[in-house]
Amino acid sequence: MNDEYVHREALLDPYLSRLLIEPLLGSRDSNLIPIHLEEGPSDILVFLTGQEEIEYVEKLVQESLRQFLGDNQKLKVLPIFSSLPSEKQIQVFMPPLTGFRKVILATNIVETSVTIPGIKYVIDPGLVKARTYRARTGMKSLIFVPTSKAQALRRSVHEAAWVIQ
């Protein structure tokens, strides 16, 4: 068993795939907290694979921020995915309160169809959900696969100065 095998297996399992996401977002050594503490005031866009993962990461980020930064977070975490009510989707387009930064947790809905003003940093775990057919079981399923080069390029054009993969 090697790292490539473990990574491939983790991509196929929605619970194991979270292990690939947590280092990006859920620890003091993650990418999110240093960007927030050390970089300029621009907003952060995080690409995730779907609503369930966004809701999980939203809780993870808020818990991490409370743990590491206490009440002085000055960070607004906002989700956006296709089934989110439009009145909540609109919040990602509003400017943050003075002195605050937005962290937008998004599916590939924002890859091509919308531009969110104020984004300077993009965190992209490099995963998407893809429909697959397993001949052995005769079933269709969604699995996690690496983003294509074209998707990675589209994701990076959000005025980002810093793209983390």
Image (tube, rainbow, N blue to C red):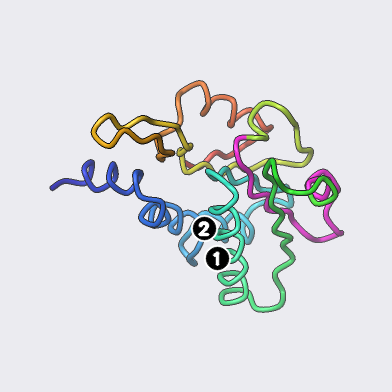
Q: Nearer the viewer, residue 131 or 135?
A: 135
- Look at mark 2 in the image and give the residue it sits on: 25
Question: Quadrant of the rendered structure where residue 97 is?
Answer: bottom right
Query: In this rendering, which labeled residue sits more in front, label 1 or label 2?
Result: 1
**Secondary structure under badge 2?**
helix
Residues packed near mark 1 inside 10 Å, few (<14), some (14 to 19) or many (20 plus): some
Magenta span covers which residues? 89-108
Please determine whether, in this image, residue 145 is positioned above or below residue 153: below
- Look at mark 1 in the image and give the residue it sits on: 60
106 within the magenta span = yes
3 within the magenta span = no
Residue 82: x, y in percent? 69, 40
Residue located 23% across and 41% down the image: 4
Identify the residue at the far left of this view.
Answer: 1
Residue 154: x, y in percent? 59, 25
Residue 95: x, y in percent? 85, 49
The tag earlier along the polypeptide, 1 or 2, is 2
Identify the residue at the far front of this view.
Answer: 138
Residue located 86% across and 59% down the image: 98
* 13 lies left or right of 58: left
Q: Nearer the viewer, residue 154 or 81?
A: 81
In three-dimensional space, the C-alpha distance between marks 1 and 2, rounded to whole angstroms, equals 8 Å
Q: Nearer the viewer, residue 12 or 102?
A: 12
Q: Amino acid at mark 1?
A: Leu
Q: Which mark is residue 108?
A: none
Q: Are marks 1 and 2 in contact (CB under 8 Å)?
A: yes
Q: Amino acid at mark 2?
A: Leu
